Image (cartoon, rainbow, N blue to C red):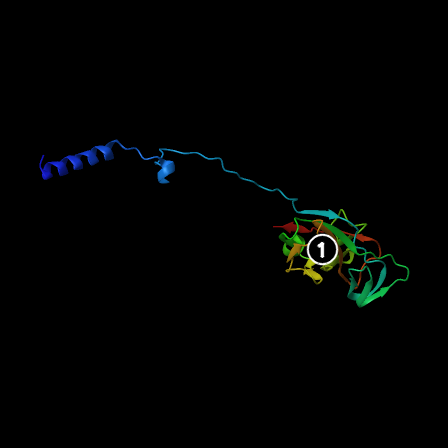
C-alpha cells in the first residue's frame, strides 16, 4: 500500500470516528439545547392600612360678647385669643377640636378642607335658624381652620386652611400608623350678631 493510500485510509478512519462519537456533556462541560424548559417563579403583594379619619373633640370657641364686626381666635391648645371687637366671658368653656388620622407609615398624602374650596367659609347657624334660611345676624363663619403640627414628621409646623386655600401636603410618620391632631381656628362675627348658640359642620378629606 502506497504512502498516499495509507494517508487516505487514516483520514477515512478519522471521519468515521467523528461521525460516530457522541460527546459526554459532563466531560465536555457543554449541554445540548433543549426545545423547552419550565421553572417556578414567585410573586408577592402587601396590603397596608387605608387612609382613615376618626372625629374626636368638637371645636368650641366658648362664650363672648360682640361689640361690632370682628373676629375671635381659638388656638390648637384650646385657648381663646381676641382678634377684634369681641369681649371674652369669664368661665367660658373652650376646646380645641381633634381628629385621628390613620395612614400607612411614611406614606405621603394630602389633607384638605373641601368646604373652603367649594362653598366658602364654614358656616355656623343660630339654633333658631338651623333648619331655615338664616340671615347674616343668625350666621357666623369660620374663615380659617388651624391644624397643629404632627407629633412627628410632616407637617412639622402648624397648618392653616382658609377659604380658597383648602389643601396641604402631609405625611404620616407615626410608628403606629396614626396620630391625633388638634384643631383651632378663626371665627368671624357680624356687628348685629344675634345672641344664642351657633353650630355647624365641616369636612376634612385625606387622599393619596
User: In which quarter of the view is residue 15 placed?
Assistant: top left
Mark yes or no: residue 119 visible: no
Q: Position of residue 94 (x, y in %)?
A: 84, 57
Q: Is 42 positioned to the left or the right of 189 in the image? A: left
Image height of 169 relative to 11, above or below: below
Q: Position of residue 109 (x, y in %)?
A: 63, 53
Q: Is 173 positioned to the left or the right of 39 in the image? A: right
Judging depth in this view, the residue of 149 and 134 nearest the camera is: 149
User: In which quarter of the view is residue 155 placed?
Assistant: bottom right
Q: How many marks?
A: 1
Image height of 71 relative to 96, above or below: below
The residue lying at 85 percent from left, 61 percent from top is 64
The residue lying at 91 percent from left, 59 percent from top is 91
The residue lying at 73 percent from left, 54 percent from top is 123
* Disc 1 target residue: 122
Q: Position of residue 104 (x, y in %)?
A: 65, 48
Mark yes or no: residue 19 visible: yes
Judging depth in this view, the residue of 39 and 108 nearest the camera is: 39
Amino acid at each position: 500500500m502506497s504512502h498516499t493510500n495509507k494517508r487516505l485510509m487514516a483520514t477515512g478512519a478519522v471521519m468515521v470516528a467523528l461521525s460516530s462519537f457522541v460527546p459526554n456533556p459532563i466531560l465536555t462541560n457543554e449541554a445540548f439545547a433543549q426545545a423547552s424548559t419550565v421553572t417556578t417563579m414567585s410573586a408577592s403583594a402587601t396590603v397596608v392600612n387605608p387612609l382613615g379619619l376618626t372625629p374626636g373633640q368638637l371645636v368650641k370657641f366658648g362664650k363672648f360678647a360682640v361689640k361690632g364686626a370682628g373676629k375671635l381666635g381659638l388656638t390648637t391648645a384650646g385657648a381663646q385669643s381676641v382678634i377684634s371687637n369681641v369681649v371674652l366671658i369669664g368661665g367660658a368653656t373652650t376646646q380645641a377640636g381633634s381628629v385621628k388620622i390613620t395612614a400607612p407609615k411614611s406614606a405621603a398624602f394630602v389633607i384638605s378642607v373641601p368646604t373652603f374650596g367649594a362653598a366658602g367659609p364654614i358656616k355656623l347657624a343660630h339654633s333658631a335658624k338651623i333648619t331655615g334660611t338664616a340671615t347674616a345676624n343668625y350666621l357666623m363663619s369660620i374663615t380659617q381652620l388651624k391644624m397643629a403640627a404632627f407629633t412627628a414628621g410632616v407637617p412639622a409646623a402648624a397648618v392653616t386652611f382658609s377659604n380658597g386655600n383648602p389643601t396641604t401636603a402631609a405625611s404620616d410618620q407615626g410608628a403606629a400608623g396614626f396620630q391625633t391632631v388638634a384643631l383651632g381656628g378663626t371665627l368671624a362675627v357680624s356687628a348685629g350678631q344675634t345672641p344664642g348658640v351657633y353650630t355647624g359642620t365641616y369636612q376634612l378629606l385625606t387622599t393619596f
